[in-house]
Amino acid sequence: MKKHLKDLLEYSHHFNSMLIEKFNDGDLHLAIPENTLRLFSHILNAQYIWNSRIEGEDVKTDGWKVHDKGDLRDLENRNFNKSLEILEKLELDNGISYKNSKGEQFQNSVQEILFHIVNHSTYHRGQIATELRQNGLEPVVSDYIFYKREN
């Protein structure tokens, strides 16, 4: 299962990186809708929050904080590397107790949380694709099967 989760994290990282390139592509960065950057920032914020929860850190950050486009690549790379580090060092069935943003207590396994990170990112990349299309821009096609055909 670790191999499969690593593959899913790499898939997510691949397409997040492609979106970052698109956001910073020449003059195109001027046309990126504001909500698109908000959604992508949320992807990065959420992965940071979940990584921190797994590691037992109490995170006080806004999941919807919008980041500067120039900071996205560094944030993405740090999140990805931290998720891989977690995958390598922890057992997947380890229970993680954490509080959500409302202060409610929950427990999930490392495996469930890492899968959630990937699934959450995929969901919001779909929203980003819709936004780009609605604004006359070509979205990044980020289907998992396309990733597997190339890798």
Image: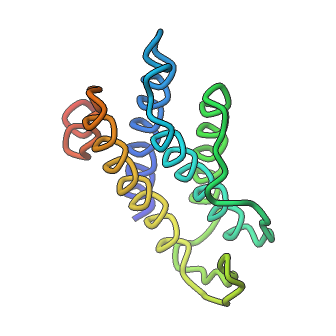
Q: Nearer the viewer, residue 66 or 78?
A: 66
Rendering coords of residue 30 (x, y %): 49, 19
* Total marks placed: 0
Residue farthest top in this picture: 26
Please determine whether, in this image, residue 35 is positioned above or below residue 83: above
User: Which residue sits at x=26%, y=46%?
Assistant: 144
Location of the N terminus by quadrant is: bottom left
Rendering coords of residue 33 (x, y %): 44, 34
Residue farthest bottom in this picture: 105
Please determine whether, in this image, residue 52 is positioned above or below residue 31: below
User: Which residue sits at x=61%, y=37%?
Assistant: 77
Please determine whether, in this image, residue 70 is positioned above or below residue 38: above
User: Which residue sits at x=52%, y=72%?
Assistant: 92
Image quadrant assignment for residue 116: bottom left
User: Which residue sits at x=59%, y=39%?
Assistant: 76
Q: Nearer the viewer, residue 80 or 24?
A: 24
